[in-house]
Amino acid sequence: MKIAYLTAGAAGMFCGSCMHDNTLARAMHSLGHEVTLAPLYTPIRTDEASFAVERVFYGGINVYLEQNFGLYRQLPRWMVRWLDRPAVIRWATGFGISTEASALGGLAVSVLRGMEGNQRADVERLAAWLAEDLQPEVIVFTNMLVAGGVPEIKRRLNVPVVVTLQGDDIFLNGLVEPFRAQAIAEMARLDQSIDAYLTNSTYYADYMAAQFSLSRDKFHIIPLGIDTLDFESLSPRSAHDESPRPLTIGYLARLAPEKGLHVLVEAFELLKQRPEHRETRLHLAGWLGAQHKPYAKEQFDRLRRAGHHEHVRYHGEVDRQGKLEFLAGIDLLSVPTVYHEPKGLFVLEALAAGVPVVQPAHGAFPELIAATSGGLLVRPGDSSHLADTLHALLLDPRQRQQLGAQGRAAVLKSLNARHAAERTVEVLQHVCRLRMASNARV
């Protein structure tokens, strides 16, 4: 198949969706399909080699200027397209561009309006590239919020368009009114032009269809998968391994309120009150954006005031090798998100390294735990229950080894990038067949 795969960059941040899209596109390519991964807004940043083309559509600088300055929209394209160069966008994002929904409501609605929005020139540029240069058999947008140009694209190309939903609700629910209601209305309009939706969990399919009035019968579930090649060489953990280091809890995600760092910090404080955990450590790794530095400082200050700062280490954002080393140095992982996580890549990464997880019983986590038998679930937002569960698991090396081994086996066998790519291609081929049948009837 010839597949156009369009992914939204995250302004220089290590983004789970970008990394997932990059892994999946490369895996489909390895199966023999012609896949072009093209970034929207900003270049993508991944902890693996980027599979994306070195060009950006809907360049973030131009999109912003088009939204806020009417005269700018009248300039000839040749005068402004240099601002879409990846190097220029990377330079600009180095100054900390905000991606907060509360500040981007008008822009989000405008992009969803496609040819009727302020980014008409970007829609035309992307549609022309797809129709004249790429000519794919199917197009995949990996975010509904960037799919406003789909009606124009389908007018130029008679091919199916699929949208992957993997966290759109978080941004939408952060919009202030009237922009949230307007965005939802635009999504309902676009639903008529979308041939299928892909999600990584049944929970998220049901939620997005009900919450945003999308056609539930168009949804297909693609089990989450990661590239497991470098994990396969790791030595399996044993309950009899004797390690000189203290027991260590890991957290591998953005340092942000929605990821529940404060819940884990409170649980860690409760845990440290027990004599068995005087030497227990907390290791953190993940991207810290400028907007969340006050929040992170509050958590670190809290730990310092409690006298635990010597037992806490922040590794910063880690690359692929750094991630493997981080996982090798922890005994279990917990990212107690306060929102309903649609994916949970960090769960699969921990399990692939043989590290059991303790996660809240909401979002995609119950399905991931059921599929892998690699962890335990706790009441969402309940730091006391989290502390009790961490305590019991830390003091039971045999259960940790069993959960980690079960999770590792499940991920390496079936929750890997190849299986996810095979399932995705099956759905895309099915959608293409339906489109061909519909065209034949016409």
Image (cartoon, helix red, strand yellow):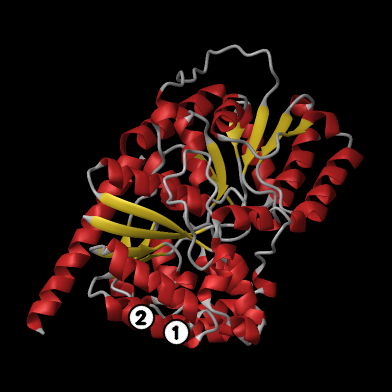
SS at mark 2 in the image: helix
In the picture, the disc for residue 371 is none
Residue at horizontal 24 percent and vertical 71 percent from the top: 159
Q: How many marks?
A: 2
User: Label 1 is placed on what type of residue?
Assistant: Met
Mark 2 touching mark 1, by CB under 8 A? yes
Kindly identify the residue that appears in the image at 33 percent across and 75 percent down: 194
- Res 419 seen here: no
Q: Position of residue 137 (x, y in %)?
A: 23, 63
Please give the name of the residue rendered at 63% of the width and 29% of the height, measured from the top-left corner: 394
> In the rendered view, would you say 388 is above or below 441?
above
Say which mark, if any, is on residue 152: 2
To which residue does mark 1 refer?
A: 115
Q: Does residue 192 lie above or below 266 as drawn?
A: below
Packing grade of label 2 (10 A; few <14, some 14-19, many >=20) is some
Q: Give x and y (percent) for residue 323.
A: 57, 33
Residue 94: x, y in percent? 70, 53
